[in-house]
Image (spheres, grey):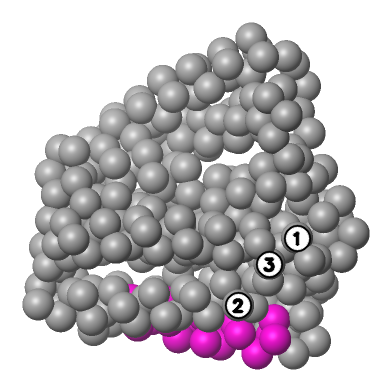
Amino acid sequence: MLETFGLFLLGLVFLALGGDSVVKGASGIGRHYGLSPFVTGLVLVAFATSIPELAVNARAAFVGAQSLALGNAVGSNLVNFGLTLGLAAIAAPLIVRWRVLAPLLVCFIVLSLAIVGMGLDGVLSRIDGMLLLLAFAAVVAFAVARSRRETADVQTVLEGFTETRGGLALNGARIVISAIVLFYGAKWVVQSAPLIGASMGMAPLLTGLVPVAIGTALPEIAAAVLAARRGQGELVAGHVIGSSLCNLTLVLGGMAAFRALAVPASFVKFEVPAAIAFAVALYPMLRGDLRVSRVEGGILVAAYVAWLVFVLATGTH
């Protein structure tokens, strides 16, 4: 079992390294070919942090570990709202100037409700998956169009996110190497996580919801705390909301489009509604004074801990 834990931790490290490297490589290649630094930065800020989850879930779906993938997809969203955003706000109050984030949070709530409706029959079909992929494209287009009207300060922050060193060859090499690293990281996590979960009495869905979701989010939590201390609240909130939307549409949608997903009753009755509850609680914070205080961050963390205690205590997944 010690070897299995070691393989799991090594997989998490590889996922973190691969995800960071692919973002830098994509930034450099985008700049080389003259893509708008603002648009490139927006897409990377909002959606690139889902790369580790995407790699894990693609591997899990490929090998037939669909329950693990389902748990990781929604569990990552709960970690995003409860731990990543909450701990960052506790480290330093978040001032969020990126005004499109509140409408994007509404998109998350609406799409989550749609997934609940889709899953009531116990399956996310391939057509459901394709609809979610279309929704992802629409959300990206909406975010880009609305964000062009943001203040110069916000646009400067987003453009700055694309800064990277090296020419086309170096950034191309980064993409290739990061793809290899992500492949092995995802392979080792998917291979070891069910064994670790079973040793703790966890079913695959709960394993994805808790240890895998928290493990893949740890680097992002650390980065969010640092960004909060630098006064980059829009980057923290953008990562959280964008990543959650990506998990909901691109990750879940891609898995379902590849192969219809069997959905357990708890997924539509408990896990997804829990993520909706977090988003609903966050909305007044962003819609009001565009500030997430330390107290509000503490509430988000406490809510996540309460949810975690409940699911571990019930053990019904």
Q: Is residue 7 left or right of residue 31?
A: left
User: Type of residue at label 2?
Assistant: Pro
Q: Are marks 3 and 2 in contact (CB under 8 Å)?
A: yes
Residue 115 placement: quadrant: bottom left
Which span is picked out in magenta? 272-287
From this view, report whether residue 108 is shown above or below residue 154.
below
Counting residues from the start of the chain, the first of labels 3 and 2 encountered is 2
Residue at screen point 9% across, 77% down: 121
User: Type of residue at label 1?
Assistant: Arg
- The residue that mark 2 highlights is 103
Counting residues from the start of the chain, the first of labels 1 and 2 encountered is 2
Residue 146's mark? 3
Q: CA distance from mark 1 to mark 3?
A: 5 Å
Give the residue furthest to the top: 169
- Find residue 253 and report its horizontal and vertical position in percent: 30, 57
From this view, report whether residue 126 is shown above or below residue 170.
below
Residue at screen point 61% across, 62% down: 143
